[in-house]
Image: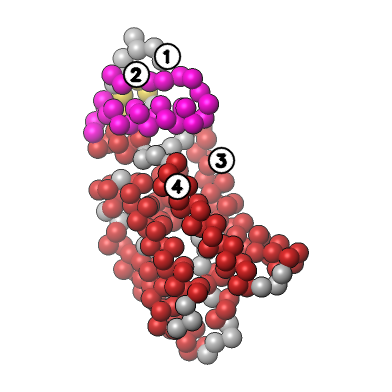
Amino acid sequence: MANWYFTLELFCQNPLSYVSIASFYCFGYACGVIFFFLPDQLGRKKTLMLALGMNIIAMYLAIYDQRIPVKKFGFFLNGLFHIKNSGSIIHSLEMVPDVYKNANFTGLLLFEVSVVFYACLVFYFYSPSIQLVFDIHFILGVGMYLAYCLVVPESPRWLFQRDGPKSKDAINVLNYIAWFNGSSKRIPLDAHFDIIGQVVNESIILN
């Protein structure tokens, strides 16, 4: 979710008010370093559920509430939980094999910058309404957040780091990913990993 559209409706405001509001994002961004321990402590998914959930609240306050102090708080929250930016990339890269990491990272960047492109399409072909873009973006953001919570599992790499090379939770996640991708192969729960994706016991054959 981009910050650029937060500022669109502020261009007609007093410049001093606009600068003050934007500064709250920077202040929150600086304070956000206190959450850098969360991905290793809570896991990638729980951290992102928290950060993205707070980002949705921040977005709602910044977009829909017309009171300047509330907008400032929305910008502050958005900056405070900026760990969603790096956290989402880390979680995504840990869910794919090394051969797909470059393509995965490129896709994430393209998705991020596409927000402006889609907004321009709405402005040009449908309606030059900033509020409409706000509504579409907010609804899609909430929908994708719910989809993430329901569909995307925890990082198997983090589970192996937490539980060790015989983590059943990590193996269950890998099997879930295989099922989700349409593969019939499964990893036995008694498999032993030395690094992510490599089974130590060669006598174990995938079903």
In three-dimensional space, the C-alpha distance between marks 1 and 2, rounded to whole angstroms, equals: 8 Å
Task: Give the residue type that dot 2 points to.
Answer: Pro
Q: Is residue 153 left or right of residue 169?
A: right
* Mark 4 residue element: helix
**Tag 4: amino acid:** Tyr
Image quadrant in which the C terminus is located: top left
User: Could you tell me which residue is drawn at 33 percent across and 64 percent down?
Assistant: 32
Q: Residues within 10 Å of mark 3 (few under 14, many from 20)?
A: few
CA–CA distance in space, label 3 to label 4 = 20 Å
Graded by Cα atoms within 10 Å as few (under 14), some (14 to 19) or many (20 or more), the crowding at tag 4 reads some
N-terminal-most mark, 4 or 1: 4
Q: Which residue is mark 2?
A: 188
Q: Which residue is mark 1?
A: 207
Element type where label 1 sits in the image: loop
Q: Which residue is mark 3?
A: 103
Evaluate if marks 1 and 2 touch, with contact meaning CB atoms under 8 Å apart.
yes
Amino acid type, label 1: Asn
Q: Amino acid at mark 3?
A: Ala
Labels in figure, total: 4
Crowd tier of the residue under label 1, counting other residues whose Cα lies within 10 Å: few below 14, some 14–19, many 20 or above: few
Q: Position of residue 31 (x, y in %)?
A: 31, 68
- The percent coordinates of residue 127 (x first, y second) are 71, 69
Alpha carbon distance from label 2 to label 4: 26 Å
Q: CA distance from mark 3 to mark 1?
A: 29 Å
Check disc 4 and report the residue beneath it. Answer: 148
Is residue 139 in view?
yes
Residue at horizontal 31%, vertical 14%? 201
Q: Residue at x 38, y 72 (%)?
A: 76
Stretch of the chain drawn in magenta:
163-190
Q: Residue reaching furthest top?
A: 203
